[in-house]
Image (cartoon, helix red, strand yellow):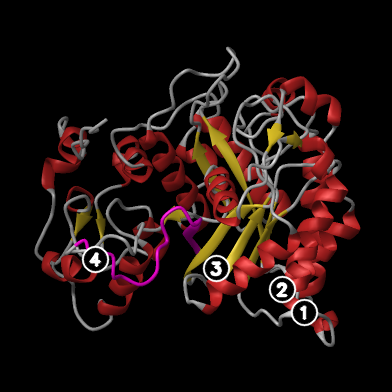
Amino acid sequence: MTRPLVPAGARIGVDRTKVEHYGWRMAVLDLKRKLAILSDAAKYDASCASSGAEKRNSLSGPQGRGKGVGSTEGMGICHAYAPDGRCISLLKILLTNFCIYDCAYCINRVSSNTPRARFTVKEVVDLTLNFYKRNYIEGLFLSSGVIQTGDYTMEEMVRVAKSLRLDHDFRGYIHLKLIPEASPELAAQAGLYADRVSINIELPQDESLNILAPEKDPAGIKRAMGRMRLSIEDHADPARKAGRRKFATSQSTQLIVGADAARDGDILARSANLYGSYKLRRVYYSAFSPIPDSASRLPSMRPPLMREHRLYQADWLMRFYGFTQGEIVEPGEDLDLTVDPKTAWALRHRGDFPVDVNTADRDTLLRTPGLGTRGVDRILSARRQTRLTLADVKRVCGSTKRAQPFIVTADWTPGGLTDAKGLKASLVVPEQLSLF
């Protein structure tokens, strides 16, 4: 028997005026349909280091006989990295994709004509436990649209984590997305039950956020980040740690790339400020994806994916290679998409090269194209025993193609190659054409 459609606001407390204005109606959905909607809606959040898991379907196989065990297709399972560096599988979902806000860049905005669903707290808890017991996942990433108020939404998310931890003694990984408008007390509770938390600042420039998401408060987002930083540091203090519950070890955020006019230098300047001011573990970059019925002030095309990739490389240079943001790219400028940021820097500073891998210090080696942190550490270890040749460097680093024009070894010197006019062209990796 078909159930009648009912006003969504009457079921979940969304502002009924907005619901009726935009014509939202929601039939009773089964759990699988909810999961399909709310896992798909969560894919736009990159701040759990998500990379889509390979989809597997028990109905398919080499013989197509449907005798496999376990499907992950459409089930919201993704890969992420835990605070200790482990790659883990997570159930990545929204509590609901109903939202009272009308952020122009968001597919779940109040004015968007998209299928809506909402989990109950018990449904999320049961899903997490069932997936965990079947070894599909090692944890949960939970975000949500804002319903009723920030406090109401945050309280529902905290109830999920609290139930998992206290009622079911769940020891898996939990990442909670904080609602900036929620009270400090609720954010602190989230930290007690989550391994990591995140607050998305979304756009790299406050002016853009004011235009595209006028209901959000950039200052309020920063205050929430600041309070969480203090709470994390307080709970990490060895002098106060004894006898206290574990607390989230870090926080992260996401910046959308290409939704506004911010250049790469502006984006990295914002990231450098976030790392310095709030001690974030990671800033994630998500290329803007055009959405149906979007505002005219948004781009009609997504930025090149290579731009997102170059930002991650530049971010890595700031965090692990000793580069400052200004050395990589100035505000108002964009990164070179044809070569990686470290190679681009080296080409602008050819006078600092070549460097001798047998005598150069670690900081100098880290600034050399083609040498990663592990490769540099292996070079420093190996050269204590012998003078390294080009073959030795290749063995410990895996390749010397990018490094050769910038290094000297016991049996190799680049000669005029370092200053050659065609050097950059020789280092450009051909881009694979898109199939779509």
Q: Above or below — where is 93 with respect to 135?
A: above
Q: Position of residue 14 (x, y in %)?
A: 82, 37
> Tag 4 or tag 2, which sits nearer the N-term?
2
Label 3 with label 1: CB-CB less than 8 Å: no
Is the magenta region chiefly helix, strand or loop? loop
For the residues labelled 3 and 4, say whether their Cβ atoms are less than 8 Å apart.
no
Q: Amino acid at mark 3?
A: Ala
Measuring 80% from the left and 44% from the top, which residue is drawn there? 12
- The alpha-carbon separation of the residues under discs 1 and 2 comes to 6 Å
In this rendering, the label closer to the viewer, 2 or 4: 2
Q: Is residue 210 magenta?
A: no
Residue position for label 4:
397
Give the CA separation, mark 3 to mark 1. 23 Å
Residue for point 62% across, 32% down: 106
Which element is circle 4 on?
helix
Q: Quadrant of residue 6?
A: top right
Q: Which residue carries the number 1 mark? A: 167
Q: Amino acid at mark 4?
A: Cys
Q: Are marks 1 and 2 in contact (CB under 8 Å)?
A: yes
* Residue 63 spot, x, y in % from top left: 17, 64
Alpha-carbon distance for marks 3 and 4? Answer: 26 Å
Query: Which residue position holds label 2?
Result: 164
Stretch in magenta: 64-80
Q: Earlier in the sequence, mark 3 or mark 1?
A: 3
70 falls in the magenta region? yes
Query: Is residue 346 visible to us here?
Result: yes
